[in-house]
Image: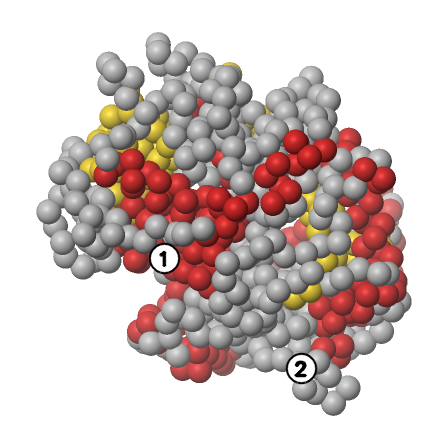
């Protein structure tokens, strides 16, 4: 398992512009660069860095703005209620169908961060590898009728070097746990300090026979790569880190720019991919910040938009050659959308946890990760101890069911509960279904006049059964930890996803998959897709490490193809 | 309304440089100074003038909000200046809801006379009558909207015009800081070297 190192002697491709200054490059759209990468998030940031540091010229098109550290505020209302950095209903509306035969209604069913760094800048920073079983579970346990459950075309062993590379380049805190997959290097940093939610989680988990362990987090527990250690401010989930202690695409993109070969062009919304007469991509047509249509020409195109916008862009790129959408000869583009099943149990304790401080998650339990036929349904998942302790979230939805929503008693409940409460988040598999999908809406348009996306999603009954099972365990755990009151909200079908997975799955068979094992589309030789859409199965709830490992692996492979003239 | 970005740059000129130096101590000092400067500017400052609501409308909104989060030994929605949050919102980010809000309040007030003869405004009711009326009309869309704006105005970042003096955060026992150190709470004190 050897990671290919950037070769300083590598021949610089012929079409690479000659500028070699340190600092971001500037290209005109008519300049034919080596690569256009669409999206600067978890995958796109890594992709741009891998390609630029290997000597290629890269233009990154990012629809959002570039925010810098002084803009990073603890402003919950701005982030989560005004959707400051999220896709918004007024400019990018969506229709949602709660199942194939349900009527569409206009609501935001998929959400993602649209700014330089994307979701990797704003995530909780759980950084958990898949395990070998995630890649070949279909072979191991057999087919599941009515689903598109399948093996990946790659193994854990093939991806392992790139998990390691991601962990060491981005910075991950953790220590070996009882359920860890094999790893070629230890964690770069020791775990973050435990919080009260972690102590109680560990106590309760042990009491019910589980094996808790420190959470693996892409957050510095000590200074790392010139960035400071976590200052424990508590604002990870949905917020960029003002201390830059979170490892993200945002922290590696400057490495791409420092080559002098990478331009990150913000405020640019990709509209379609144009083809030449031979059926090869010529570049990406986009609307710039002034909403003028531009074509950025490139030798090859890499889409790293996310599991909703990558298929959306392909479907909007239909042509006479690809009437059902670009690279969609299989009809699989947009299908198999997976959100990861999830559910929440909560509890209050006698003493004050003050768990709104500090990095969100410090202890997890992976005992239920593997599929267990004796449970009577497919699936596996994880539990983590945390607290959604943001003031607005708590005031609107944090109190136990049946609590008053206003008045003196409501205020008393807030005063009593906020400092004494924690949650256990259950996160797990979603089965891939052909009917859970991203399509073009036949009528709805976005602010650029492009067909908006229509999202159809209905959890598989096994996903629901898994969540009921994990919620039961979580409630037991919290009671065993000594909670004075524990509760769980009923498991409900999801109508809103932040994990956007599976919609352009990789595979060896062009009839049933969209990209090959190196993320090249089966249909277009110089078009690559790499992000959550590539995932064949959903994993158990924390996809960012896998998305970034895939991007490191794909970036290396795509550079190799380009060097050999194979794009 | 003071823009946080403006006072951040005023209080911590060269803030970006502090980050590049990657020195958390220095960084926190500059953030804390900025926060203190902001608080000092606000402490004891009179409420800003109304931008959209009339004084009568503002009084009604404030009275409703004060029933939703009453004042006891800790401040409530009134002290958090929810009414200024609402008023400033209707002037800016919630402009689109201005007409519906003002009409909704008018209809809400109009319904009072059916129950309390001669009463035209919510503020004319006694506190006990106010509570009784709200309980009876708990599911009305206007009151549900008032719950939303009262909670948003009480617990949001103070820049939005409410949560004056961090009143809402004091109710929760929440403190906004750019840095904490373990031990964080009672249960992790021993694990983090504390006395328990």
Residue pictured at 80% horizontal, 63% vertical = A205
Residue pictured at 60% horizontal, 67% vertical = A175
* For residue B41, side relative to residue B125 (left or right): left
> How are the residues colored?
secondary structure
* For residue A128, side relative to residue A400 (left or right): left
Secondary structure state at the residue bearing disc 2: loop
Q: Is residue A277 visible?
A: yes
- Position above or below: A313 against A480: above
Secondary structure state at the residue bearing disc 1: helix
Q: Quadrant of the C terminus of chain B?
A: bottom right
Q: Furthest-front residue in view?
A: A1
Q: Quadrant of residue A265?
A: top left
Q: Name the one closer to the observer, A441 or A51.
A: A51
Which chain does the residue under circle 1 lie in? A
Q: Is residue B170 visible?
A: no
Residue pictured at 80% horizontal, 60% vertical = A210
Which residue is denoted by mark 1 in the rendering?
A252
Q: Name the one closer to the observer, A373 or B7.
A: A373
Residue pictured at 59% horizontal, 48% vertical = A130
Count of marks overlaid on the render = 2
Q: Residues within 10 Å of mark 1 (few under 14, many from 20)?
A: some
Q: Name the one closer to the observer, A475 or A417.
A: A475
Q: CA distance from mark 2 to mark 1?
A: 32 Å
Q: Furthest-left residue in view?
A: A18
Numbered tag placed on residue B192 in the rendering: 2
Q: Position of residue A333 (x, y in %)?
A: 49, 23
Q: Position of residue A254 (x, y in %)?
A: 30, 58
Q: Position of residue A293 (x, y in %)?
A: 26, 29
- Position above or below: A424 against A538: below
* For residue A184, side relative to residue A339 (left or right): left
Labels 2 and 1 positioned on one and the same chain: no
- Position above or below: B7 against A6: below
């Amino acid at each position: 398992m050897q990671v290919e190192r950037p070769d300083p002697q590598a021949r610089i491709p012929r079409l690479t512009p000659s500028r070699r200054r340190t600092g971001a490059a500037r290209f005109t759209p008519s300049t034919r660069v080596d690569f256009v990468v669409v999206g600067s998030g978890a995958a796109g940031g890594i992709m741009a860095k891998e390609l630029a540091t290997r000597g290629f010229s890269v233009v990154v098109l990012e629809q959002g703005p570039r925010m810098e550290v002084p803009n990073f505020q603890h402003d919950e209302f701005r982030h989560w209620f005004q959707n400051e950095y999220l896709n918004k209903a007024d400019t990018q509306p969506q229709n949602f169908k709660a199942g194939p035969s349900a009527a569409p209604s206009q609501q935001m069913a998929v959400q993602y961060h649209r700014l330089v760094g994307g979701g990797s800048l704003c995530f909780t920073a759980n950084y958990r590898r898949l395990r070998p079983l995630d890649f070949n579970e279909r072979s191991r346990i057999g087919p599941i009728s009515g689903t598109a459950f399948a093996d990946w075309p790659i193994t854990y062993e093939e991806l392992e070097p790139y998990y390691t590379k991601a962990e060491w380049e981005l910075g991950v805190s953790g220590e070996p746990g009882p359920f860890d997959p094999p790893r070629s290097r230890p964690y770069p940093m020791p775990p973050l300090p435990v919080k009260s939610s972690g102590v109680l989680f560990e106590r309760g988990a042990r009491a019910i026979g589980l094996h808790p362990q420190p959470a693996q987090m892409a957050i510095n527990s000590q200074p790392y790569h010139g960035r400071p250690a976590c200052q424990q401010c508590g604002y990870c989930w949905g917020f960029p880190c003002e201390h830059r202690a979170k490892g993200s695409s945002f922290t590696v993109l400057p490495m791409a720019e420092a080559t002098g070969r990478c331009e990150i062009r913000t405020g640019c919304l990709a509209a379609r991919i144009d083809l030449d007469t031979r059926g090869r991509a010529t570049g990406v047509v986009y609307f710039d910040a002034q909403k003028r249509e531009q074509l950025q020409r490139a030798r090859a195109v890499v889409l790293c938009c996310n599991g909703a916008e990558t298929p959306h862009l392909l479907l909007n790129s239909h042509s006479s050659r690809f009437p059902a959408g670009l690279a969609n000869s299989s009809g699989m583009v947009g299908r198999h959308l997976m959100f990861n099943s999830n559910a929440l149990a909560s509890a209050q304790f006698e003493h004050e946890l003050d768990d709104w401080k500090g990095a969100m998650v410090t202890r997890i339990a992976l005992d239920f990760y593997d599929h267990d036929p004796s449970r009577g349904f497919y699936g596996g998942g994880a539990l983590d101890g945390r607290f959604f302790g943001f003031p607005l979230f708590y005031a609107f939805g944090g109190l136990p069911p049946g609590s008053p929503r206003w008045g003196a008693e409501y205020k008393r409940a807030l005063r009593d509960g906020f400092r004494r409460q924690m949650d256990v988040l259950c996160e797990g598999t979603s089965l891939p279904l052909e009917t859970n999908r991203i399509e073009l809406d036949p009528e709805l348009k976005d602010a650029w006049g492009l067909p908006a996306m229509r999202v159809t999603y209905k959890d598989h009954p096994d996903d629901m059964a898994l969540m009921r099972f994990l919620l039961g365990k979580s409630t037991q755990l919290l009671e065993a930890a000594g909670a004075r009151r524990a509760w769980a909200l009923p498991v409900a079908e999801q109508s809103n996803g932040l994990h956007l997975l599976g919609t352009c799955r990789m595979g060896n068979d062009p009839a049933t998959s969209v990209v090959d094992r190196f993320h090249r589309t089966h249909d277009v030789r110089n078009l690559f897709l790499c992000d959550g859409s590539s995932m064949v199965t959903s994993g158990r709830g924390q996809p960012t490490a896998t998305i970034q490992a895939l991007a490191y692996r794909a970036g290396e492979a795509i550079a190799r193809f380009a060097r050999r003239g194979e794009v | 309304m003071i823009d946080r970005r403006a006072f951040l740059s005023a209080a911590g000129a060269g803030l970006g440089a502090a980050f590049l130096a990657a020195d958390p101590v220095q960084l926190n000092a500059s953030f804390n100074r900025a926060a203190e400067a902001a608080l000092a500017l606000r402490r004891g400052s009179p409420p800003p003038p109304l931008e959209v609501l009339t004084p009568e409308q503002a009084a009604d909104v404030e009275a409703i909000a004060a029933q939703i989060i009453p004042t006891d030994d800790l401040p409530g929605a009134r002290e958090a200046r929810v009414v200024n949050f609402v008023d400033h919102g209707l002037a800016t980010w919630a402009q689109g809801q201005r007409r519906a809000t003002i009409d909704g309040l008018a209809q809400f007030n109009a319904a009072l006379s059916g129950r309390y003869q001669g009463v035209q405004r919510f503020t004319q009711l006694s506190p006990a009558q106010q509570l009784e009326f709200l309980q009876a009309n708990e599911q009305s869309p206007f009151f549900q909207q008032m719950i939303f704006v009262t909670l948003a105005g009480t617990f949001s970042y103070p820049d939005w015009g409410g949560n004056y003096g961090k009143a809402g955060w004091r109710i929760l026992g929440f403190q906004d800081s750019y840095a904490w150190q373990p031990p964080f709470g009672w249960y992790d004190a021993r694990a983090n070297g504390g006395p328990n």
